[in-house]
Image (tube, rainbow, N blue to C red):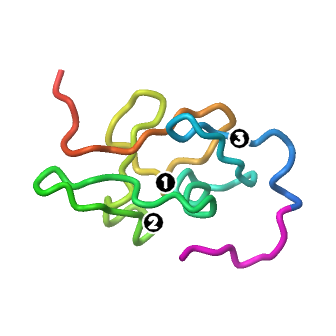
Amino acid sequence: MFTRVEPGSASLSGGNVLDFEGSPVPFRSGDSVAAALLAAGVSPLRETPVDQSPRAPYCMMGVCFECLVEIDGRQNQQSCLTRACPGMIIKRQHGARTLR
C-alpha cells in the first residue's frame, strides 16, 4: 500500500486533476504521474509483454521501467519521471507498444 509521508489532503484542491482511464485523479503540485496514481490507489500500471504479469512502480527514480504507461497517446512513458499536469490522459500499458 502506498501512503504519503505528510498527512492531510488540503493541497489536493486547486484543480489539479488528471484523467486515468476515464476517472478523475486529483494530485498535488509537484507529484509525478506515478505518485499521483499510487496515492489514488491505482495499481497495477502495466502488464508485461511476455506473460501479461501485472506491474507497478518500484524504484520511483527511472531505473526499473516498471512504471510505464501511456500519457496523452504516447506509449512507454516513465510515469515516475513525468510530472503530473492538469488534463493529462493516462492509460495502462498493455503488453508491448504498438509499432508504427
Name the secondary structure under disc 1. Answer: loop
Q: Quadrant of residue 96?
A: top left
Relative horizontal placement of residue 52, taking residue 11 as reference (left or right): left
Q: Quadrant of residue 76?
A: top left
Q: Is residue 3 magenta?
A: yes
Question: Which residue was labeled with disc 1?
Answer: 81
Q: Do the residues under discs 2 and 1 have CB atoms within 8 angstroms?
A: yes
Q: In the displayed structure, would residue 71 be above or below residue 82?
A: above
Relative horizontal placement of residue 37, taking residue 78 as reference (left or right): right
Residue name at image x 20 percent, y 30 percent? 98
Question: Which residue was labeled with disc 3?
Answer: 17
Q: In the displayed structure, would residue 66 be above or below residue 74?
A: below
Three-letter code for the amino acid on which mark 3 is drawn = Val
Three-letter code for the amino acid on which mark 2 is drawn = Met
Indicate which disc, 2 or 3, sits on the residue closer to the N terminus. Answer: 3
In the image, the segment drawn in magenta is 1-9
Question: Which residue was labeled with disc 2?
Answer: 61
Measured as percent of width and height from the top left, residue 83 is found at 59, 48
Q: Observer-nearest residue: 52 or 98?
A: 52
Q: In the displayed structure, would residue 86 be above or below residue 29?
A: above
